[in-house]
Amino acid sequence: MIDLKYLEFLENILTDNRKERFLKVLDQRTNHFTIAVEDVFQMHNTSAVMRSCEVFGIQELNVIEQRYGKSIDKEIAMGAQKWVDIHTFDSVTNCIDTLKNKGYQIIATTPHEDDCLLENFDISKPSALFFGTERDGLSEEILQRADGFLKIPMVGFTESLNISVSAAIIIQNLTNRLRNSDIDWHLSEEEILVKRLAWAKNSIKDIKRIEARYYEENAKLI
C-alpha cells in the first residue's frame, strides 16, 4: 500500500505543472503490452528501445542479460530510465516464466512459418513482445515457448531491421491501435499511485535527506 501522506508530502515540493504532467503521462501509460529484449550486444540499442517504450507509453521493459551484462546507455535513453520500469533477468527461462505468470502471452518478433503481419496482430490479449540480438536473433528457447510470432511487412531487398528500429515501429503501431480500441488498457489506480510516488522521488534532488526529514517529523507526532 502507498503511504498517501508521504506522496502528498513529496508532491507538495513539486510544481503544479510537474504534477499535472505526471497525471497526463500516466493517463497514457499501459501494462497491457510489455517489451523484452534478449542479450542485445550493442547496449545503445537496448537504451533506444527503452526510449521508444517511454515515448509510446509502455511502462515496463524486461532485459535478459544472460551473456552481455552492460548498463543502460543514459545518453541514448535521454532520461527515459527515470520513467520506465526496467526488470532484468539472468536467464530466458526466468523471464518467460515471470511474464507468463503475470498473464502475458509470449510473442516472438521474427519471421516464422506461423507468423502474423503487424497490422493483423490481435491486440486484445496482454502480450510480451520479445526482440532478439542483432547477431543471432531470438534464442531457440524463446522460439519454442512462444505463443505467437509477429513480423513487420517489408517490400525491399533488405530482410531485417535494426532491433531499435523494429521495436519503435511495432510499439508505435500496437499502442496507437490499443488507444483507439475499447480494450481496458490503462494502469490501475494503485499502479498510478505507485508511479506518482516513484516519479516524485526521481524528480527531487537530495531525496534521501527529504525522506529522512519526513519520517523524523512524523515520528514526533506518534
Image (cartoon, rainbow, N blue to C red):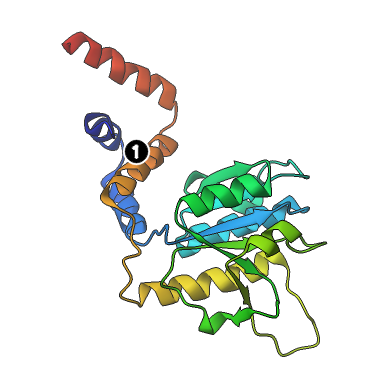
Residue occupying image coordinates x 23% and y 16%: 218
Quarter of the figure with the C terminus: top left
In this rendering, the answer to whether 52 lies above or below 208 is: below
Left-right relation of 182 to 68: left
Residue 213 image position (x, y, % from top left): 32, 17
Residue occupying image coordinates x 30% and y 50%: 17
State which quadrant residue 161 falls in. Answer: bottom right
Left-right relation of 215 to 56: left
Residue 175 visible:
yes
Is label 1 in a helix, a strand or a loop?
A: helix
Residue 214 image position (x, y, % from top left): 29, 20
Residue occupying image coordinates x 44% and y 61%: 57
Q: Residue placed farthest to the left in the image?
A: 221
The residue pinned by badge 1 equals 197
In this rendering, the answer to whether 214 lies above or below 149 is: above
Q: Residue placed farthest to the bottom in the image?
A: 155
Residue 89 image position (x, y, % from top left): 63, 43
Badge 1 density bin: few <14, some 14–19, many ≥20, Cα 10 Å: some
Residue 79 visible:
no
Number of dots carrying numbers: 1
Which amino acid type is shown beneath numbered disc 1?
Leu
In this rendering, the answer to whether 125 lies above or below 203 is: below
Residue 127 image position (x, y, % from top left): 50, 64
Left-right relation of 61 to 43: left
State which quadrant residue 14 falls in. Answer: top left
In this rendering, the answer to whether 71 lies above or below 49 is: above
Quarter of the figure with the N terminus: top left
Q: Nearer the viewer, residue 80 or 35?
A: 35
Q: Residue placed farthest to the front in the image?
A: 144
